[in-house]
Image: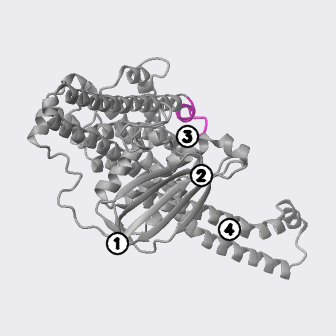
Amino acid sequence: MLKQYLDVEHVTAIREVNAAVINISGRQRMLSQRIALLSLKLQAFSCEDEREGIEKELHELIDLMELSHNGLIYGSYNLKLPGNLSSEVAEIYFEFPFQLDRRIRSFIHAVRCLLNVPSETLDKNNHHLKYILDEADRNLLDALDRVVSQYQKEQEEQDIAINQYQYKLYQKSRQSEKNARSRSEELEQALDTLQRTQLQLIQAEKMSSLGQLVAGIAHEINNPISFIHGNINYAERYVRDLLDIIELYQKIYPEPDLEIQDLLEDVEFEFVAADFSNLLQSMKLGTSRIRDIVVSLRNFSRLDEAAMKEVDIHEGIDSTLLILQHRFKSTDKQFEIEIVKEYNCNSLVECHAGLLNQVFMNILSNGIDALEQHRSIFIQEKRTPKIIICTNLREGDRVEILIGDNGPGIPETVQQKLFEPFFTTKPVGKGTGLGLSISHQIIVERHQGSLQCNSEIGKGTEFTISFPRLHVKLSDPPHSISKQSNSVKKSSERIDSEIIPDYLHIDSRLNLSQSSILGIV
């Protein structure tokens, strides 16, 4: 029984169910706004073809909204929704002041009534239309925001409970080892297995969340931005042609009517003609910036590359730096972190790119935190905080990556515990103590390399990552944790079942996978 709750896929499935609930409840908010907009267009448009298209889309949206609403309340096998509302969520749906269930059903009913109103009698004073617009702007919107916030709060509480459960499991394993010296070797093996499972569970969750983020950005931002960016050149050409025509008219007819002259002065035609090119260039620069950010996020995650692949590690470093750029530039110009890059490794490197980028993220984030904690000292001494990144190709065809800072340094006693699971010097709520532990596991076990820390108080800290540029295939992959030995099973079964929380039980009918969850959100 215990093995079921140590299974990374099982616990990940629980979290994916929560993600589906949050995403679909959030989608209800988007549907309400879209339906309100289309309802307003339905009243404004008189063309029969346009109205027919709007009516068709409205029918589809309210059907989807009703299906999602019923699934959230009663559960849905197809949508992978469990139902089982908490008392807090049920209060939002069925009790005053929100009464979200009544509001959604009344909203859907009003839309259906609006669709039955003849086009010739439909105007902006229609009471169904007024009700739809008012609900979408105030009461329904507030209620949807409230239920999404509650779902998110419950997911965060569940994540904390899972982490506490894992920590209790770790502590109990340690106690069992102390009380049973005669079986120390057996319990030590069980403890090591549990620690690895915990770290991979957290790592899988982080990468799963990052995958959903990248997929959302690619779908919601990349396509429309590419459309805008690709059409700016055409817009510039069309407007230039129109301006040429106007210029020709002015040449042939130098003295137009007074009405035309007044209009040209009112719109400041000469300024608009001169400034329009600058306006389009600004738009092009902005869309290019957004596209670069999307590409950087894709390069950072590389979720589609499970196997090792030859990549340019500098792209991963640059993508990570771009994601963290908001933390380098402070509103206080007296404290801006300077990034110094010295890239000397010009060869492609065989690695797990997504995992390696996660290591970069953990080390750089810790460096930024250390510098920010001593902001006042840098400002007082008028020193510039720096992060230095250097890559080299050493003898033996080994890649070396140095990431250092000129911060306060790390005491020797702390350096000895840096790569231990759950060890952190940050305040409660600021860190889990797993970042460097996971990074050490990624470099040592997945890349057959080493991760070391060298620090001197008052001078700064430097992390050294080293691993072979090319790898041989491992005979026993590190991720095959599920194949436990009989001795580990026995020692695991001796751990009390009382520390297994009830929330880990989900409906066995929901055979959830990452692909199925992503398919519905």
The mark nearer the N terminus, 3 or 1, is 3
Question: Which residue is denoted by mark 2 in the rendering?
Answer: 406
Farthest residue in the bottom direction?
252
Helix or strand or loop: what does disc 3 sit on?
helix
The mark nearer the N terminus, 3 or 2, is 3
Q: Position of residue 1 (x, y in %)?
A: 14, 31
Chosen colour scheme:
one colour
Q: Are marks 3 and 1 in contact (CB under 8 Å)?
A: no
Circle 1 Cα neighbour tier, 10 Å, few/some/many (<14 / 14–19 / ≥20): few
The main secondary structure of the magenta stretch is helix
Question: Which residue is denoted by mark 4 in the rendering?
Answer: 281
Q: Which residues are magenta?
A: 123-138
The amino acid on which the numbered mark 2 sits, given as a three-letter code, is: Asn
| Distance from the alpha carbon under mark 3 to that under mark 1 | 82 Å
Horizontal side, residue 9 vs residue 254: left or right: left
Q: Are marks 1 and 2 in contact (CB under 8 Å)?
A: no
The mark nearer the N terminus, 1 or 2, is 1
Q: Are marks 4 and 3 in contact (CB under 8 Å)?
A: no
Horizontal side, residue 506 vs residue 276: left or right: left
The mark nearer the N terminus, 4 or 1, is 4
| Distance from the alpha carbon under mark 4 to that under mark 3 | 46 Å
Question: Which residue is denoted by mark 3 in the rendering?
Answer: 121
Q: Position of residue 327 (x, y in %)?
A: 59, 48
Helix or strand or loop: what does disc 2 sit on?
loop
The mark nearer the N terminus, 4 or 2, is 4
Nearer to us in this view, 148 or 237: 148
Question: Which residue is denoted by mark 1 in the rendering?
Answer: 396
Q: Position of residue 292 (x, y in %)?
A: 53, 63
The answer to whether any part of residue 45 appears in the image is: yes
| Distance from the alpha carbon under mark 4 to that under mark 1 | 49 Å
Q: Which mark is residue 24?
A: none
